Image (cartoon, grey):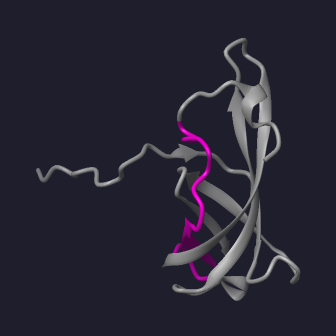
Amino acid sequence: MESMVERRAEKRLRYSWPVWFAEDYDDILTQGQMIDISSSGAAFSCYSDRCPSPGEHITARFSIPQFGEDETFGLANFIRDGRICRVDQLGPYLRRVAVQFSEPLPFKPAESQPVEQFMVV
């Protein structure tokens, strides 16, 4: 059996919350569903009729769950520009989009961080 070699430099946080995106943030926003995220990029799903293409630049708005040491819960809200790296077909009407952020997040989402540090950015 062939073993898979993990090439990712950072563990991803997998969650399913809305992400809003557009080529220009002043345009009409399209909703997608977050699949996973790291500090340098994310993957989300969206309908094929509103899907960006590889190489395009988008602006995305999304929230990341944050769990505190004392079992508190909060959200870190972000707006990030990025470039579409890859688009995969998940079905006849659904696509998975991989985006690389122009500016990395200030933390690694898969690592536990105190809620107070990242409430709104």
Q: Is residue 53 left or right of residue 12?
A: right
Residue at 68% from the left image edge and 78% from the top image edge: 58
Q: Is residue 23 left or right of residue 5?
A: right
Please tell me whether residue 28 belongs to the stretch shown in magenta. Answer: no
- Front in this rendered view, residue 8 or 16: 8
Q: Position of residue 104 (x, y in %)?
A: 57, 56
Q: Is residue 27 left or right of residue 11?
A: right
Residue sitting farthest toward the top = 70
Image position, residue 50 (x, y; %) = 73, 84
Q: Is residue 95 magenta?
A: yes
Q: Is residue 118 above or below residue 69?
A: below
The stretch of residues the image draws in magenta is 89-110
Residue 43, can we see it? yes
Work out whether residue 86 or residue 113 is closer to the camera in this orientation and state it.
113
The residue under the point 16% across, 49% down is 3
Residue shown at 22% from the left, 51% from the top: 5
Rendering coords of residue 102 (x, y %): 58, 68
